[in-house]
Amino acid sequence: MTQTDLLAQGSDQTTEKKILIIDDDEHLLLGLTARLKTNGYAVVWASDAVIAISVARKEAPDLVILDLGLPAGDGFLVLDRMRALSDLVAIPVIVLSARDPADNKKRALDAGAAAYFQKPPDNHEF
């Protein structure tokens, strides 16, 4: 499933698609933001697990790109909370993590992530 397919699932709106990036890596945020904006997406951010859910609820993104290694909690906590809240449960989540996929990919997918990618993201795959 491609990122475009995931965005199509996340919203029926005809307006610009919005992506929430939840990551504390400033260089990754800048690079992904530039790439996504170039492709016509609106981008919003959250840099830790504490504010991630409130930003997701306020911004109602069409897609979330989620790191697992976050300050103030980890990405699994964020994913679990998103899947438990009725206003966030249908938003597709792509996990993008530097953590070992052997230990985390199945767990992320079982928790409701739509896809799992290893950092740094491959431009063709991601």
Image (cartoon, helix red, strand yellow):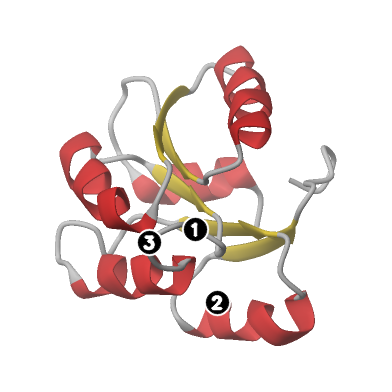
- At a point 67% along the width and 22% down the height, the residue shown is 35
Name the amino acid type tagged 3.
Answer: Ala
- For label 1, the residue is 70
Alpha carbon distance from label 2 to label 3: 19 Å
Q: CA distance from mark 3 to mark 1?
A: 6 Å
- Between marks 1 and 2 in the image, the one whose residue lies nearer the viewer: 1
Q: Which residue is mark 3?
A: 72
Check contact, mark 3 vs mark 1: CB within 8 A.
yes
Tag 2's secondary structure?
helix
Q: Is residue 86 left or right of residue 67?
A: left
Taking depth in this image into account, of 99 and 15 the one nearest to the observer is 99
Q: Along the horizontal axis of the image, is 107 left or right of 77?
A: right
**49, above or below 83, in the image:** above
- The location of residue 125, given as percent across then percent down, is 81, 48
Q: Amino acid at mark 1?
A: Leu
Query: Contact (CB < 8 A) between labels 1 and 2?
Result: no
Depth check, front residue: 70 or 118: 70
Q: Would you identify the image quadrant in which residue 38 lies?
A: top right
N-terminal of the pair, mark 1 or mark 2, is 1
124 or 12: nearer the viewer: 124
Q: Could you say whether the residue bearing mark 3 is in a helix, strand or loop? A: loop
Tell me the quarter of the picture where residue 73 sits: bottom left
User: Which amino acid does the dot numbered 2 rest on?
Assistant: Ala
Residue under label 2, please give it: 108
Q: Position of residue 31 (x, y in %)?
A: 68, 26
Q: Is residue 64 above or below residue 74?
A: above
